[in-house]
Image (cartoon, rainbow, N blue to C red):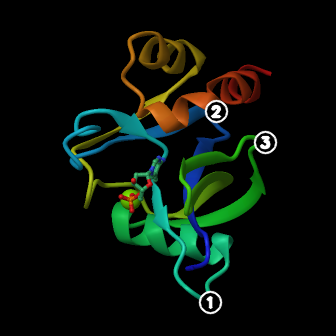
């Protein structure tokens, strides 16, 4: 039996504009074209915070400061759990190395993405918390 693995996603918020960064997936086919909080798998021996910094460096070419976790954890499969950590960009401007496109959304934009079913299903659980956070 293998250890459960974590996938870490970044709730990247720009405090100046109160916008959240969404990234459009290219793969796999089931979620291609849908939008997510960017991130990826935590490697063996790596902390979730370090994994998120690495993933956002690889995927977006930015350096981030990682904060606290969002409340919800999502079981993707028996052996894979998805978490989200708050993050702020401290260097660089995000560009999509791995994604089709990037978008900064405010509460209205995030609400529209959610309403229109444009978010990857796993990430939809974070919408209420993110709406509160962006709006509050
Ligand atoms: N996943 C779901 N929501 C997210 C992220 C970053 C990832 N916000 C799922 C998609 C894949 C798995 O986790 O099944 C691994 O993610 P990646 O390495 O393909 O980004
Ligand atoms: Mg990824």
- Residue named by callout 2: 126
Give the image quarter of residue 20. Answer: top right
Q: Marks 2 and 1: in contact by CB < 8 Å?
A: no
Specify the label residue 64 is tagged with. none
Q: Reply above or below: 90 against 77.
A: below
- Residue named by callout 3: 71
Specify the label residue 45 is tagged with. 1
- Can you give x and y, in whole percent of width and height, for residue 117 in the image? 39, 17
**Which mark is first along the chain, 3 or 1?**
1
Give the image quarter of residue 48. Answer: bottom right
**Which mark is first along the chain, 3 or 2?**
3
- Can you give x and y, in whole percent of width and height, for residue 135 in the image? 72, 20
Q: CA distance from mark 1 to mark 2?
A: 27 Å
- Can you give x and y, in whole percent of width and height, for residue 101 in the image? 26, 41
Q: Reply above or below: 102 against 55.
A: above
Q: CA distance from mark 1 to mark 3?
A: 24 Å
Taking the image as shown, residue 68 lies to the left or right of residue 102, namely right
């Amino acid at each position: 039996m293998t250890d459960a693995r974590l996938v870490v996603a970044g709730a990247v918020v720009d405090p100046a504009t109160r916008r959240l960064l969404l990234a459009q997936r290219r793969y796999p086919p089931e979620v291609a074209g849908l939008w997510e909080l960017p991130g990826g798998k935590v490697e063996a021996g790596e902390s979730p915070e370090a994994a998120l910094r690495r993933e956002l460096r690889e995927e977006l070419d930015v350096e981030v400061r990682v904060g606290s976790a969002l409340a919800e954890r999502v079981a993707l499969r028996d052996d894979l759990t998805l978490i989200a950590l708050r993050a702020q960009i401290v260097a660089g401007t995000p560009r999509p190395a791995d994604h089709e496109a990037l978008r900064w959304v405010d509460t209205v934009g995030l609400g529209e993405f959610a309403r229109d079913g444009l978010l990857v299903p796993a990430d939809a659980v974070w919408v209420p918390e993110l709406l509160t956070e962006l709006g509050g």
